[in-house]
Image (cartoon, rainbow, N blue to C red):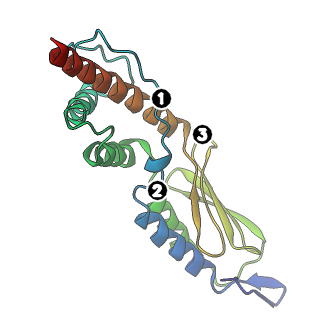
Amino acid sequence: MNISSTTISGSLYIPNTRNAVAKGMSQAASTKFSREDTVEISGKKDAENTSATTEFENNTSLPDAVVENIRRMAREDAKKGVYMDEEYVAYRYAYKNQHISPDRPKLLMGLNKILSTLPHIVNRFQTFSLMGCRATVDFYSSFSAFYNSNGEKIMTCDSDGDVMEFPTKAESKYYSETTAVYAEAYDAARAEMKATAQG
């Protein structure tokens, strides 16, 4: 869908801009596991001689309770022979959204609300402050970009309402740490199971 624009008294009026943003908001909310499929499984260690019941030190920035939950789920997945089962994927995604990620759907809703009060656009580019973040809008192309307080681009929305998310440094660190914790516990559990079977 192309956004049609009409010049009115020297200013640009874009009647469907907020519809594109609203569409993007709906699509963003429906892509719950959009990035889980692209998580790189890294940080695995050779745990042939490590017991699954060994107490690991928490050398991450994550709370102890979260680390223990991840280790528990990793051990359960090792017994099932499934690496990163759905329960773990859902847990990691939910914690990230609640504690790590910016609220992207809410940002889209906020911008949509602002745009609904701007029937006439004077300048092509305009910047808005939302929830500690910054949103820039190109009213000619109906393209929006969102930046967090650190200046990191976190999301864009085009004229068709298609949303593209960009991971923040905090999100990337979270994925790296959770993957390493999970892999260590999973490998240790599998090594213990193998040792038990051979013994």
Residue at the extreme front = 198
Does residue 183 sit above or below 52 in this rendering? below
Q: On the rendered structure, is 84 left or right of 8?
A: left
Q: Nearer the viewer, mark 2 or mark 3?
A: 2
Q: Amino acid at mark 3?
A: Asn
Residue at the extreme top = 49
Q: Which residue is mark 2?
A: 34
Q: Give the mark nearer the N terminus: 2 vs 3.
A: 2
Foreground pick, 64 / 86: 86
Q: Give neighbour class at mark 3: few <14, some 14-19, many 20+ (Cα, 10 Å).
A: few
Foreground pick, 72 / 124: 72
Q: Give the mark nearer the N terminus: 1 vs 2.
A: 2
Mark 1 vs mark 3, CA separation in Å? 27 Å
Does residue 143 sit above or below 116 in this rendering? above
Where residue 17 sits: x, y (%)?
63, 79
Q: Classify the position of the C terminus by image quarter.
A: top left
* Residue at image point 19% right, 32% down: 79
SS label for mark 1? loop
Say the numbered circle drawn on residue 42.
1
Foreground pick, 108 / 128: 108
Q: Amino acid at mark 2?
A: Ser
Q: On the rendered structure, is 150 left or right of 170?
A: right
Where residue 39 sits: x, y (%)?
48, 41
SS label for mark 3? loop
Q: Is residue 31 visible?
A: yes
Q: Nearer the viewer, mark 1 or mark 2?
A: 1
Q: Which residue is mark 3?
A: 150
Does residue 29 sit above or below 48 in this rendering? below
Q: Give neighbour class at mark 2: few <14, some 14-19, many 20+ (Cα, 10 Å).
A: few
